[in-house]
Image (tube, rainbow, N blue to C red):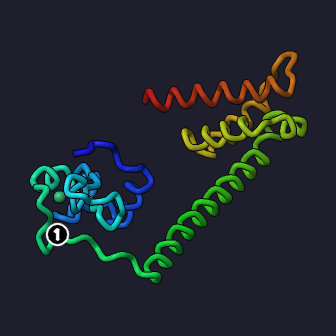
């Protein structure tokens, strides 16, 4: 019998069609390891067409002979147009929600940087910050909290740094924040 692996796209399409659930016992990932199996084996002339493929867990697959399936082991009927449409709508909604989340997160990043940058380094700092600096500020907010960032920003503002350039003030702010992160981790 040929052990040539199934085409990855076909394999994934079958797993998705079967809702990542073993069609024999109904268990699903991650409880079991799922495979895509031939209903009529290749040895018996079965094809790699999805209509001849079924999702099976390792246990069920091990117990199955090449003789074919019992009545109750038939694969799901092909999806109707309505089901395909409903699935497409769910996928689209999922991506929309993701984009919306990204937008909200980005807005929030812009808000905190707009609030804190002038305090940390004066009006010159904001245009100097690159996206990676803004992301690191957002990351620090997650590790600490906004109130702590505000406190450190005010502390930096009040600090009399010798030869302090705007960028030095930003670096000083980051350094204090990371000290606070370490303190928090240690406590
Ligand atoms: Zn199973």
Q: Which residue is mark 1?
A: 73
Measuring from the top left, give residue 108's x and y in whole percent.
Answer: 68, 54
Q: Nearer the viewer, residue 87 or 185?
A: 87
Judged left or right of residue 140, residue 14 is left
Question: In the image, residue 88 lies at what x, y percent?
Answer: 52, 72
**With respect to residue 94, does 48 lie above or below?**
above
Relative vertical location of residue 56 with respect to residue 116 in this rendering, above or below: below
Outermost top residue: 162
Residue 23 lies left or right of residue 110; in this view the side is left
Quadrant position of the C terminus in the picture: top left
Q: Is residue 84 above or below residue 144?
A: below
- Quadrant occupied by the N terminus: top left
- Residue at 41%, 81% (x, y): give it: 80
Q: Residue at x 22, y 65 (%)?
A: 23
Q: Is mark 1 within 8 Å of ligand 1?
A: no
Give me the residue at 61% from left, 38% from top: 140
Q: Quadrant of residue 79?
A: bottom left
> Could you say whether the residue bearing mark 1 is in a helix, strand or loop?
helix
- Viewer-proximal residue among 126 and 153: 126
- The image quarter containing residue 68 is bottom left
Q: Residue at x 56, y 69 (%)?
A: 92
Position of residue 134 measured from the top left corner of the image (x, y, whole percent): 72, 40
Circle 1 Cα neighbour tier, 10 Å, few/some/many (<14 / 14–19 / ≥20): few
Where residue 96 appears, x then y in whole percent? 60, 66
The answer to which quarter of the image holds residue 132 is: top right
Outermost residue toward the front?
45
Q: Is residue 9 left or right of residue 62?
A: right
Query: Can you tell me which quadrant of the image ligand 1 is in?
Result: bottom left
Viewed as shown, does residue 129 lie left or right of 4? right
């Amino acid at each position: 019998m040929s052990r040539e692996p199934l085409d990855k796209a076909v394999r994934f399409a079958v797993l998705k069609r079967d809702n990542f659930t073993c069609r024999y016992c109904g268990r699903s990932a991650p409880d079991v390891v799922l495979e895509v199996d031939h209903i009529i084996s290749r040895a018996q002339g079965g094809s790699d067409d999805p209509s001849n493929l079924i999702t099976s867990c390792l246990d069920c697959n091990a117990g199955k002979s090449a003789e074919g399936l019992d009545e109750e082991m038939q694969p799901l009927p092909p999806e109707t147009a309505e089901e395909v449409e409903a699935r497409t709508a769910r996928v689209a909604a999922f991506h929309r929600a993701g984009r919306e989340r990204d937008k909200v997160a980005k807005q929030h990043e812009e808000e905190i940087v707009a609030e804190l940058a002038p305090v940390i380094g004066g009006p010159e700092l904001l245009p100097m910050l690159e996206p990676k600096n803004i992301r690191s500020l957002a990351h620090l907010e997650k590790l600490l909290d906004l109130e702590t960032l505000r406190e450190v920003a005010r502390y930096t503002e009040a600090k009399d740094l010798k030869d302090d350039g705007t960028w030095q003030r930003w670096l000083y702010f980051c350094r204090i924040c990371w000290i606070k992160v370490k303190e928090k981790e240690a406590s």
